Amino acid sequence: MNTKLMRQLSICGIDIQSYLLLKRGFKPVIRLDVTENNPNNIENFIKVSETHVFIKTFDEYYDQKLSRPLSFAYISLSEDLAQEAYEANKTRDLKSLGKLLGYPECCIDSFIRNLGTSVNHMIESFLNTKTKLSFYCNSLFNFDSKVDEYLNKIYHDYYNIFTANDNFFLIRHMPCAFDCKKSIEIGRKTLEILEEELPELAEKIVFALKKPILYFDYFNWIVFYGNLKDNVLYYSKVLPYKSLFPGNNLKIIKEGNRIEVLDDKIIVYKDSKFLLKIEKQDKYKGVIMDFS
Ligand SMILES: [Zn+2]
């Protein structure tokens, strides 16, 4: 992949994974929020990438009057598909829009079902997982479509923290479950292409995703080097991916090597020595998700 194109992608805020899938014909359309973008940036990108774009501004979005207009660009190798994605977006045909973005039907359905509710998509996918969690489906670092307006404010307040690793994903959508077959298929394909085009990035992504996580909510989690056995996490290291997890507790956890997760509390040990107890607000605020 040439550096000029990489620069254009980054200026426009298009992730490399989506672009590569689009160019290879595995993703029909990329939808991009260009409200803050300079239209020239998109124009330049279209020239370099030989794609088509359809930019539309919404004053109203899904029956809600917007305080400031929203602009979306629909980028595709086919002009018709870009237009179709815009139409689907305008008429709120989320199913068609999701399909045009290349997402699996099972995941679109579950996303639509949870839309407008307060469910945490990560916990939902976790609870729907029937077999083993697959790192291809790990969407910890990806905030796209996860956060509503209130959560979006937190996300933007800590923008630098959460954008530092936001290219660590192999699927762009929220999976219906962390063992969703269709999502794993997309993740595999994405990794295969990344390994060809940008092997170093591919390696970094797999390293970050294939790990156990202590997960509380979108903004509070810890990634470990370790393994889970009978709901006990044995770890040798806390990895340096940052979240908003409180620093004082994190410091203690870094000194430990074992975490027991119970329904109402989390207990941290160094060998047999007790280090810390964290009371849980509910059963699912503090779970181990083992993607290793
Ligand atoms: Zn699915």
Image: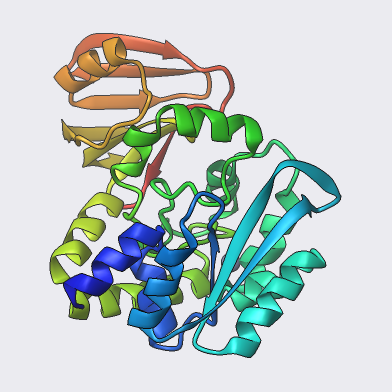
Which percent across, then down, holds residue 164? 29, 42
Identity of the residue drawn at 44% across and 68% down = 42
Residue 235 position by quadrant: top left
- Residue 176 vs residue 117: left or right? left
Q: 207 or 22, which lies in front?
A: 22
Give above or below for 61 relative to 160: below
Q: 21 or 225, which lies in front?
A: 21
Give above or below for 236 relative to 105: above
Q: 180 or 143, which lies in front?
A: 143
Identity of the residue drawn at 32% across and 54% down = 168
Q: Quadrant of ligand 1?
A: bottom right
Residue 22 position by quadrant: bottom left
Which percent across, then down, holds residue 277? 37, 10
**From this viewpoint, which residue is outermost toward the front?**
40
**Which colour scheme appears in the figure?**
rainbow
Residue 196 seen by the camera: yes
Which percent across, then down, holds residue 144? 51, 51
Give above or below for 133 relative to 230: below
Residue 134 seen by the camera: no
- Residue 283 vs residue 254: left or right? right
Count the numbered circles shown: 0
Identity of the residue drawn at 55% across and 30% down = 153
Which percent across, then down, holds residue 183? 49, 69
- Residue 282 vs residue 109: left or right? left
Image quadrant occupied by the N terminus = bottom left
